[in-house]
Image (cartoon, grey):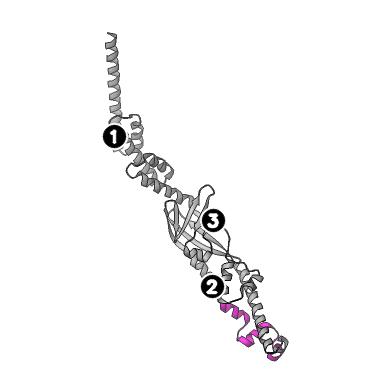
Amino acid sequence: MKKVIAFILALTMALALTGCKSSDYKSAVKAMEDGDYAAAARQLETLDDYRDSRQLLKQCRYALAVESFNAGDYESALEIFKDLGDYIDAANYVVRAQDGLLRRHIAGGWHSDVLDVTDLFLAGAESQMEGITEGLKEHDLSLKITLNCTFAEDGTCSVAGTIDDLDGFLEKLNAFFRDLMEKTLESEFAAEGLTMDEVYAALEVTSMDELFQAVAGMTLQEFLDSIQIRELIEMALEELKYEGTFTIEDGTILCNGDRLQYNAETDTLELLANEEGKELLGVDSLSMSRN
């Protein structure tokens, strides 16, 4: 008799639990139909393997993750999508959420380390006028550039370069050319057996500027301006400028043909220059810090 009573009690409890689960299941389905996936998920989590509760729970969690993603809550979305594994296109959303987080991390202004491009300038000058490199070095020329980038979460970006103390560089460059012109004229007149004092007297001038104008038909400064060094440097900077968009592929930022990688530990960017950038900057990569 006791066994019969125990069996009846167990059966009654089982039926009660089944009825409870059935009620919770129906309530969860109704919540899903109403779009309340959070409430549905809470109920489904208590149902374990009841009917298709586990599959419905995945549907709810997926819907909640999509909602978080669309709201820009990439952290929450990423956590859920990772847990969902290969469910529908969760793996694709994992990549997109990671890209969204990366866009957020890099948003703002960045500047590169100061890059000394003096040797590049000297090499270019030597190709135009043989034998002047050493003379330029003696004038302690220093041409340095800083690269500036700005990234926005909407996928737009800008790139620009600035020269450190361009006026000081041009002043030293002008001084070099003045010395060069003076030495050249002295050498040419000496070859004719004339001293500079004799040339000054013959041409009725008292300075190198006046002498240069008498010989070349323009002042030395006008000659130096005609070389357009400032304009050439500004043209090179113009080549570095970019305003447009950037994309992210497999954690790599693609901007104007250049590739950048973000280091979360150091909060820095590493610019991996394209071929044009390598030619202009003379380096394969460049570290960038926040402004």
Q: Provide the secondary structure element on which disc 1 rests.
A: helix
Q: Which residue is mark 1?
A: 29
Q: Residue at x 36, y 32 (%)?
A: 42
Q: Indicate whether 2 appears above or below 127.
A: above
Mark closer to the observer (1, 3): 3
Task: Look at the numbered disc 3 and give the secondary structure of its residue.
Answer: strand
Q: Earlier in the sequence, mark 2 or mark 3?
A: 2
**Magenta-drawn stretch, dominant element (helix, strand or loop):** helix
Asked whether the viewer can see residue 290, the reply is no
Q: Residue 90, located in which quarter of the rendered image?
A: top left
Span of residues in magenta: 200-227
Assess disc 3: are there few (<14), some (14-19) or many (≥20) residues with their C-alpha within 10 Å of its C-alpha.
Answer: some
Q: Earlier in the sequence, mark 1 or mark 3?
A: 1
Disc 2 marks a residue whose amino acid type is Leu
112 with respect to 247 (left or right)? right
Q: CA distance from mark 2 to mark 3?
A: 26 Å
At label 1, the amino acid type is Val
- Which quadrant is home to the C terminus? bottom right
Q: Residue flagged by tag 3: what amino acid is it? A: Ser
Badge 1 crowding class, 10 Å Cα cut-off, few under 14, some 14 to 19, many 20 or more, is many
Residue under numbered circle 2: 232
Q: Secondary structure at mark 2?
A: helix
Q: Can you give x and y, in whole percent of width and height, for residue 26 in the image?
A: 28, 31
From the image, which quarter does the N terminus lie in?
Answer: top left
Q: Which residue is mark 3?
A: 287
